[in-house]
């Protein structure tokens, strides 16, 4: 069964460093998403991406965040200058259309020291 | 307008019992009401979903009940099994207003053998 994969499973970084979180969505899906979950809090939407453009973003997704589909299979989330409060589990998801089920990856745990 | 409140925060039931989790929302633009199930180390996975043109949907042991006037929907798990032990999230969405899922806080369900 096709699934969304994410790498790495755990990333530790120093405050102020740039990190890139990687995702491989399901191959025939056209819509891609990033969500995050700070420990003990709810899952929060960050951004959705379609046709090489951001289609929707939340107030959390400020200028330090960016997304890219650098090739036909990967979807990345870049955090330019990490802060302590960026420590969270980051989930990538994909869907075939905007109306279809979103399939989630297993997440990347980001720890900012 | 985006607030989603889920209860209870945690739930312990005996094998064979009924588990009931509730979700209340404020945004009247929501028109898709899913429940997601998450096991440790995995991303959320769609369990069952309902659209507002029906008041109930049943899939095996899982039932969603939807009350549009009260802006509430609930998940019922009949004959609960230890394998159902997981975290459950409601995550309504306004399909006509965007693709983001708005997650509740989550309910940690434990089913004792």
Image (spheres, coloured by chain):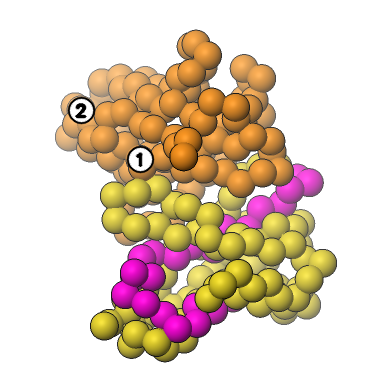
Chain colours: A orange, B yellow
Q: Please state which of the two labelled residues, at mark 2 or mark 1, is closer to the viewer.
A: 1
Q: From this view, report whether residue B45 is shown above or below residue A1.
A: below
Report whether residue B1 is seen.
no
Residue B74 image-quadrant placement: bottom right
| Mark drawn on residue A13 | 2
Q: Residue furthest top?
A: A71
Position of residue B85 in the picture relative to residue A96 (left or right): left
| Mark drawn on residue A107 | 1
Taking depth in this image into account, of A31 and A64 the one nearest to the observer is A31
Q: Position of residue B63 (x, y in %)?
A: 60, 75
Q: Which residues are magenta?
A: B73-97
* 3D distance between C-alphas at marks 2 and 1: 16 Å
Q: From this view, report whether residue B44 is shown above or below residue B22.
A: above
Q: Does residue B60 belong to the magenta stretch?
A: no
| Label 1 Cα crowd, 10 Å radius (few <14 / some 14-19 / many 20+) | many
N-term mark: 2 or 1? 2
Position of residue B27 in the picture relative to residue B5 (left or right): right
Q: Position of residue B38 (x, y in %)?
A: 40, 57
- Rendered residue at 62%/17% (across/down): A52
Q: From this view, report whether residue A105 is shown above or below residue B19.
A: above
Q: Find numbered disc 2 in the image and state the secondary structure of the residue it sits on.
A: strand
Report whether residue B58 is seen.
yes
Position of residue A17 in the picture relative to residue B71 (left or right): left
| Label 2 Cα crowd, 10 Å radius (few <14 / some 14-19 / many 20+) | some
Q: Chain ID for label 2?
A: A
Q: Position of residue A53 (x, y in %)?
A: 63, 20
- Rendered residue at 38%/70% (across/down): B84
- Rendered residue at 78%/71% (across/down): B54
Position of residue B113 in the picture relative to residue B89 (left or right): left
**Quadrant of the image containing the N terminus of chain B:** bottom right
């Amino acid at each position: 069964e096709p699934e969304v994969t994410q790498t790495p499973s755990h990333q530790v970084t120093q405050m102020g460093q740039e990190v890139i979180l990687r995702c491989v969505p399901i191959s025939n899906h056209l819509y891609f998403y990033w969500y995050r979950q700070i420990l003990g809090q709810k899952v929060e939407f960050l951004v959705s991406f379609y046709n090489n453009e951001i289609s929707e973003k939340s107030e959390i997704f400020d200028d330090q965040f960016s997304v890219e589909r650098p090739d036909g299979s990967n979807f990345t989330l870049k955090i330019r200058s990490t802060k302590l409060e960026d420590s969270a589990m980051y989930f990538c998801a994909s869907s075939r259309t905007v109306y279809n089920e979103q399939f989630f990856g297993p997440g990347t745990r980001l720890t900012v020291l | 307008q985006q607030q989603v409140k889920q209860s209870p925060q945690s739930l312990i039931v005996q094998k064979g019992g009924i588990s009931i989790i509730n979700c209340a929302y404020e945004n009247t633009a929501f028109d898709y009401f899913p429940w997601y199930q998450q096991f440790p180390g995995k991303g959320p996975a769609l369990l069952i979903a309902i659209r507002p043109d029906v008041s109930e949907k049943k899939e095996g042991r899982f039932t969603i009940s939807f009350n549009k006037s009260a802006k509430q929907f609930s998940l019922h798990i009949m004959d609960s099994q230890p394998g159902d032990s997981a975290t459950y999230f409601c995550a309504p969405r306004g399909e006509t207003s965007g693709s983001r899922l708005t997650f509740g806080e989550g309910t940690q369900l434990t089913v004792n053998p």
